[in-house]
Each structure stands twice: as structure tokens, then as C-alpha cells.
Image (spheres, rainbow, N blue to C red):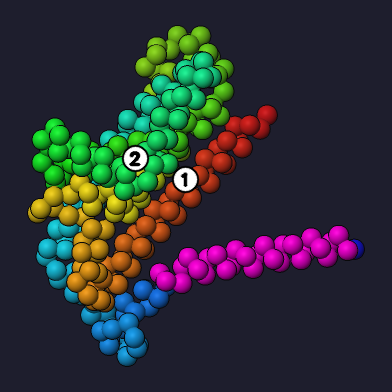
């Protein structure tokens, strides 16, 4: 009886802790979203509901161009980094020596564990040394570089789950190397590929620190633009813009969750006799 009560008490405290964590994380975001509909024009008093600030966002031509730049960078970098990440994951998976594989994984994780400020400054120095003009190209290369390790981490577990007998069976049936890859391996790891793509897309859309270092005059992304506008003073159009970006990111996270859930169901179905 006491053990059950203690267990229930433990779950209760755990739930309270989780609620407190989520409140601390999401309260500032909800506060920002709430005042994006404020007709008063400030964040000190709510004077009524309005969509004026969202209309101001959509009527700003320069901002719409920046939104387009952001999505073009995100889509291009995600597509390229997904292709490179799949190749990298396949290469790491084929390494047989444990020490060599661990070394490659460590190198892959460098751009993930390093502070974004260090990565951004390093890219800035590199682009300055090679004479690459800061702008679309520098931002695209930087986003590809920090997105590839994310894709590798998403794809590699799916490769490790794959039964080696599937490949052996395909080869016994006369399949070539390309057929094994396209007909067996890629379909099996497809959930990991899509998850990696969505994660890379989310990271690219949300990135500020690296982009701030490598963007040039005449080219900007949403995160850098929001920062620049916030420095000039509080405007509820920033709230509206941030809300739209936050909602889009939530949609990407939901897509990632659904893909992982589907992947889990496929794995369970394959494991059944």
C-alpha cells in the first residue's frame, strides 16, 4: 500500500516538474503570441483584438523577400544535406572497425556539440580567406555544413536496425549493388531520411548565430531580420512575424513526430513472425 502511494506520489511530483518546465519554456512564447493580436501597439496593456500587425507583415515587400530567401535556403540546404547525410551514414555504417567508426561519428558530431558562435566565426574566417562573397552562397554552404551531421544521426539508427540478411537475400537473387541500394536499403531507411530532412529544415529556418556571421549586405534571413528589428525598438509586427515562424516550426515538428511514429509501426510489423 505504502509502495503504491509512494509510487503515485513520485509520478505526481514528476508531472508537476514537467508542467513547470513546459510553463517556463512556453510562457514567453505564448506571451509574445498573445500580444501579436493587441490593438494597442504595445506589450504593456491589451486594448483589443486586431490582425493589423499580421497585415503589416504581409504588406512589407522587403520582409516577404526575406521570407522567400529563408525558405529557399532552408529547402536547398535540407535537400543537399539530406543527400550528403545519407551517403555519410552509409559510409559510416559500412566501416567494420569499431575504433574507426567511433572516430568518424565523433567527427560527425563536432558541428553539433560546438557552440554556434564558434561555428559561425569559423565559417566567416574561412569565407574571408578564400574570397567567397558573403550572401546567398555563404549562408547556403554554412547551413549544409551544420545540417549534414543531423541527417547522419537520423539515418544511421535505421541502418543499424536493418537486418543484414535482407541484403544477402537480394544479392543471392542476382541484384546488383545499385539495385540493393535503391530497392532494399533506401526504402527501409526512408523514414530516417524524411526525419533527417525535416530536422535539417527546422534547424535551417531557426538558425541565427551561424547565419548572423555569414550573411552579407543585401541578403538576410528571418532570424537575422527579427533580431535587427528588435534592436530598433519593440514593434508588434515582430510578434506577428515570430508567431508565424513559431507555428510553422511546430508543423515541422509534428511532421517529424508522425514520421517517427510511422517508422516505429513499420519496425514492429517487420519484427513480428
Q: Residue at x 32, y 30 (%)?
A: 84
CB-based contact (under 8 Å), mark 1 and mark 2:
no
Whichever of labels 1 and 2 marks the residue nearer the N terminus, that label is: 2
Q: Position of residue 63 (x, y in %)?
A: 16, 63
Residue at the spot 20% in from the left edge and 64% down from the top edge: 228
Mark 2 neighbour class, 10 Å CA radius: few under 14, some 14 to 19, many 20 or more: many
Which residue corresponds to the image point at 68% horizontal and 29% vertical from the top-left? 273
Residue 169 at x, y percent in the picture: 53, 14
Which range is magenta? 2-29
Main SS of the magenta part reads helix
Vertical relation: 50 (above or below) 198 = below
Q: Position of residue 151 (x, y in %)?
A: 39, 37
The picture quadrant where one finds residue 182 is top left
The verdict on residue 174 being magenta is no
In front here: 104 or 238?
A: 104
Question: Image quarter for residue 60?
Answer: bottom left
Mark 1 or mark 2, whichever is nearer to me: 2
Q: Secondary structure at mark 1?
A: helix
Expressed as whole percent of the image width and height from the top left, the position of residue 118 reads: 32, 44
Task: Work out whether 18 lies above or below 232.
Answer: above
**In this picture, residue 86 sits left or right of residue 42:** right
In terms of depth relative to the viewer, which is nearer, 206 or 266?
A: 206
Task: Please state if 99 lies on the left or on the right of 251 as rendered.
Answer: right
The relative height of residue 246 versus residue 205 in the rendered view (above or below) is: below
Circle 1 is placed at which residue position? 259
Image point (10%, 53%), residue name: 217
Specify few, some or many for label 1: CA neighbours under 10 Å numbering under 14, 14-19, or 20 or more. Answer: some
Residue underneath mark 2: 147
| Outermost bottom residue | 47
Q: Nearer the viewer, residue 174 or 204?
A: 204
Amino acid at each position: 500500500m505504502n509502495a503504491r502511494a509512494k509510487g503515485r506520489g513520485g509520478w505526481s511530483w514528476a508531472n508537476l516538474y514537467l508542467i513547470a518546465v513546459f510553463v517556463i519554456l512556453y510562457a514567453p512564447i505564448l506571451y509574445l503570441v498573445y500580444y501579436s493580436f493587441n490593438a494597442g501597439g504595445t506589450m504593456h496593456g491589451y486594448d483589443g483584438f486586431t490582425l493589423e500587425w499580421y497585415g503589416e507583415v504581409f504588406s512589407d515587400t522587403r520582409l516577404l523577400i526575406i521570407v522567400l530567401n529563408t525558405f529557399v535556403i532552408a529547402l536547398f540546404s535540407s535537400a543537399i544535406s539530406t543527400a550528403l547525410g545519407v551517403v555519410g551514414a552509409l559510409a559510416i555504417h559500412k566501416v567494420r572497425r569499431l575504433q574507426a567508426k567511433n572516430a568518424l561519428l565523433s567527427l560527425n558530431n563536432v558541428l553539433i556539440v560546438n557552440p554556434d558562435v564558434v561555428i559561425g566565426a569559423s565559417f566567416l574566417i574561412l569565407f574571408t580567406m578564400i574570397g567567397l562573397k558573403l550572401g546567398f552562397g555563404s549562408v547556403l554552404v554554412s547551413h549544409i555544413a551544420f545540417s549534414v551531421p543531423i541527417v547522419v544521426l537520423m539515418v544511421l539508427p535505421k541502418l543499424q536496425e536493418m537486418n543484414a540478411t535482407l541484403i544477402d537475400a537480394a544479392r543471392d537473387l542476382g541484384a546488383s549493388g545499385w539495385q540493393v541500394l535503391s530497392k532494399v536499403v533506401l526504402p527501409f531507411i526512408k523514414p530516417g531520411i524524411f526525419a533527417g530532412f525535416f530536422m535539417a529544415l527546422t534547424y535551417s529556418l531557426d538558425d541565427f548565430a551561424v547565419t548572423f556571421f555569414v550573411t552579407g549586405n543585401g541578403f538576410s534571413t528571418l532570424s537575422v531580420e527579427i533580431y535587427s528589428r528588435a534592436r530598433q525598438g519593440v514593434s508588434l509586427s515582430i510578434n506577428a512575424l515570430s508567431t508565424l515562424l513559431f507555428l510553422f516550426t511546430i508543423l515541422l515538428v509534428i511532421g517529424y513526430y508522425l514520421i517517427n511514429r510511422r517508422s516505429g509501426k513499420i519496425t514492429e510489423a517487420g519484427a513480428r513472425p
